[in-house]
Image (tube, grey):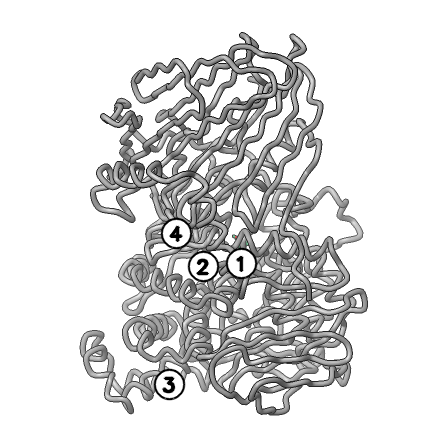
Amino acid sequence: MKQKNKIYEVKNFSLENEQLLQYETLFHNANGYLGVRSNFEEGYPDSYQTVRGEYINGFYNFSRMNQAEKLCGLTEEKQVMPNLVDTQGIQLTVCGEPFSMFRGKILDSARILDMEKGVTIRRVIWRSPGQRELEIEITRMTSFKMLPLFTIEYRVRALNFSGSIEFFSTHIGDVRNSFSSKDPRVADGAARHLRPEAAVFTPEGFSTITSHTTTSRLTAVSMVCNRLSYPAAESREARGPAAVQEFRLNLDQGHSVTLTKYTVLCDSVHYQNCEDLAADLMKQAVSVPLSDWYHAQERYLKQFWETGNIQLEGDDALQNAITYNLYQLIQSVGKDPHSNIAAKGLSGEGYEGHYFWDTEMYIEPYFLLTRPSLAKNLIAFRYTTLDAARRNARILGHRKGALYPWRTIMGRECSGYFPSGSAQYHINGDIAYSVVNYYLTTKDFDFMVHCGAEILFETARLWMDVGNYYKGKFRINCVTGPDEYTCLVNNNYYTNVIARYNLKWAARFYRMMTEENKISPLAERLCLTREEILSFQQAADDMYLPYNQELDINPQDDSFLSKEKWDFSQTPPDSFPLLMHVHPLSLYRRQVCKQADTILAHFILEDEQPLSTMRHSYDYYEKITTHDSSLSSCIFCIMAARFGMTEKAYSYFGKSAQTDLMNTHGNTKDGLHIANMGGVYMSIVYGFGGLRIKEDGLHLAPVLPQKWGGYSFKLYFENSLLAISVKHPVCEITLLSGTEKTLFFYGKAHQLKDRLNIPLEPWGEKI
Ligand code: BGC
């Protein structure tokens, strides 16, 4: 299939405040380390709201968490991803007239995200109130090659005049985070998280601001260098925690001038001695033409798209949406084990830069199949925060094991409201599941011996402490499952089934490592005995999984079916998301779901239940699920495809793919919905492609929605790279590299040597 142009462009874009806030997110630049919102260099009118921010993934400050009642063990301090600095500012003045899109006349404008080049562009043809016409093109990049580097290339062309031009480039250390007192998904207090030192200029002329977090004792250094393509009078000044550099020149009609502004931002979480490093990196950055950095960016992305893209035939709008979503994943994911991937990536301040289970259950699968080394980093991050998870378990009263925090940056819990926060113990199972998934996909036993197994043992231990036997069954009481509209329940099906998987695999790895003579050092260090392992296995075998025979469904938990159903006929459309309009208790005592819960369990562990139970459950939960969480539609898409309801799956997929581009959840301004973006990938590969990775190998069961001519993608499995193309009437699999394999299609084994052509089957319709 032909590669489509990877451009997302909005022509003659709106200058309405709400829309600009969304664009700040949609056109942000990020590389997994550094993120910059897409603010206008020159700013907006004073009456406008903006979230003007530059962030580093994994960098944090501590902030007080005010609990209304000081109950034992509640979180009293959280981490926040601080807004670090403002290096976006460039004021342009033409013959004394300051450029602003809100004055004079816009003759033409466009905002562009070029996903092959890895840059964003704002293009404007502007007529000033004094009738001077200018063409302005601003290209921005956060470099994948040098992660701390952010560049702005600001080109101005005089169209109908000759005259004076002035650039005023600012570097401001005194910045704050934004907040909302109305939305629990955003921070609730405007905060200044950094104490900037006074700005200084290095001998090379780079302005430098060193800032210290107010409470977490971390340092961030920003360095700025401005270069002009044209001879100009230049002046510079440092004023407290700010630096300005000014350029004055005369430009002839038809000519253009370019200001290139380099920012290097380094932090003490990722780097030692970041002040020296910033200076070294800046020297390196300016020692070659900017075009070299652009080429490196394009090379990086060429490689990324090589295996990372999905091609769709016959639906350009959806193709563009898919490409956009996948691009945001590579922009957001941490590139080292010191950082992870925040719920909003680096695109905004929603959820305060926290990492959730979103990583393991929604995002990691993409990297695991297309760039396994990045998935490995994400697990390594959980390994490096395992000690913090052990401490967290003690805070919650557990005698052994580790409990990962529901939301975090550096490993400590940040949940303010424990019923839908810390009580989501399934995070432990999610992380364990992802570790096993990593192993089954890569067979990287070494990694398991060094990191993975310890995570499995410590999370398994926690289940033994949180659960208990009653009437011969192992039960897990008082936890919250993925559905945040049902809290603090006994035996949440999702939690129990994933805990069982966790326990089972901990026992299995113990056996595998024993056979390979690799268990002793770890077992000794953890004081892990054979008896304890046997207890894991026993609890897994005895795990209680709620089942209702009459309905042939898995109830979400012990009390779920006894509750009254939510009355949707009395719920006006503007009452969604319900969490913004209804007291939590009203939700908790009704059958109403924010998101996929049991359905997600059926997707990830489909062999635990007969198909009929999964199908009946789907019909049951679909009627009471609001999809108020963006993590929901993609799972309903995947399972609709599993049951042969391809057109229903297609409809869920459309919703999921357009979530941010169409702002369907109304809060894209606070940042992208990154888990959903991973869900878009999963919808195609696991949903329509029917991919499952199981102990016996890789399974596929492709189906094709009527509107599509076909779709194709590549993936790594074990040591091989496979290309999969689904086009009526066959699915073609090509072994691009690696060794021959047995693959399963619609449950039947086939041997892949070079290429296989499997006729498409009406999968799932057999139910
Ligand atoms: C969802 C959670 C999710 C969080 C961050 C919430 O709305 O209910 O499942 O982890 O958002 O994306």
| Residue 471 circle label | none
- When asked about the image quadrant of residue 325, the answer is bottom right
Q: Which residue is mark 3?
A: 508
Q: Which residue is mark 1?
A: 487
Residue 66 against residue 633 in the figure, above or below: above
Q: Nearer the viewer, residue 423 or 286?
A: 286
Left or right placement of residue 493 versus residue 500 in this view? right
**Quadrant where the C terminus lies?**
bottom right
Please report whichever mark, 4 or 3, sits nearer to the chain's N-terminal start: 4
Task: Give percent across and percent down for residue 31.
Answer: 45, 48
Q: Which residue is mark 2?
A: 423
Left or right placement of residue 284 versus residue 663 in this view? left
Please report whichever mark, 1 or 4, sits nearer to the chain's N-terminal start: 4
Q: Which residue is mark 4?
A: 408
Task: Give percent across and percent down for residue 408.
Answer: 39, 51
Query: Which amino acid type is marked by label 3?
Result: Arg
Q: Secondary structure at mark 4?
A: loop
**Quadrant where the N terminus lies?**
bottom right
Please report whichever mark, 3 or 2, sits nearer to the chain's N-terminal start: 2
Mark 2 in CB contact with mark 1 (< 8 angstroms)? yes
Circle 4 Cα neighbour tier, 10 Å, few/some/many (<14 / 14–19 / ≥20): many
Task: Give the Cα separation between the discs numbered 3 and 1.
Answer: 32 Å
Q: Nearer the viewer, residue 474 or 625?
A: 625
Task: Give percent across and percent down for residue 69.
Answer: 40, 42
